[in-house]
Image (cartoon, rainbow, N blue to C red):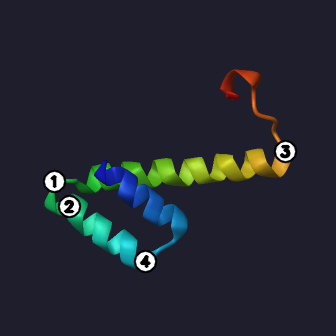
Amino acid sequence: ALGAYVAVSVTNGCEYCIASHTASARKRGMTDEQLAEVLAVVGMANETNALATGYGVPVDDAFRR
């Protein structure tokens, strides 16, 4: 759950939230490796989201409600 707060903060670009949620996660034991993994996943997700949006990739019927 702590990684999720960091991930959303990074995606939103909020310096305050990035710092506070990262500090909180580190106090609860998040390692450098875990933080690096969260940041890598956030970066990859943001890239693929931008590509899908840019190319106008339609949502698969299997994912529609």
Q: Secondary structure at mark 1?
A: loop
The quarter holding residue 26 reads bottom left
Q: Residue 44: image x %, image y %? A: 56, 48
27 left or right of 3 in image: left
Above or below, 25 against 14 in this view is: above
Identify the disc placed on residue 56.
3
Q: Secondary structure at mark 4?
A: helix
Tell me the CA gap for discs 4 and 2.
16 Å
Residue bearing the label numbered 1: 29
Q: Residue 60: image x %, image y %? A: 75, 27
Tell me the CA gap for discs 1 and 4.
21 Å
Q: Amino acid at mark 2?
A: Arg
Q: Residue furthest front?
A: 65
Tell me the CA gap for discs 3 and 4.
31 Å
30 left or right of 18 in image: left
Q: Secondary structure at mark 3?
A: loop
Q: Residue furthest top?
A: 62
Q: Residue at x 66, y 46 (%)?
A: 48
Q: Residue furthest bottom?
A: 16
Tell me the CA gap for discs 3 and 2.
38 Å
Residue bearing the label numbered 2: 26
The quarter holding residue 18 reads bottom left
Discs 1/3, front:
3
Q: Amino acid at mark 4?
A: Glu
Residue bearing the label numbered 4: 15
Report crowding for label 2: few under 14, some 14 to 19, many 20 or more residues within 10 A (C-alpha): some
Q: Residue at x 81, y 52 (%)?
A: 54
Circle 1/circle 2 CB separation < 8 Å = yes
Tell me the CA gap for discs 1 and 3.
40 Å
Q: Amino acid at mark 3?
A: Gly
Circle 4/circle 2 CB separation < 8 Å = no
Q: Amino acid at mark 1?
A: Gly
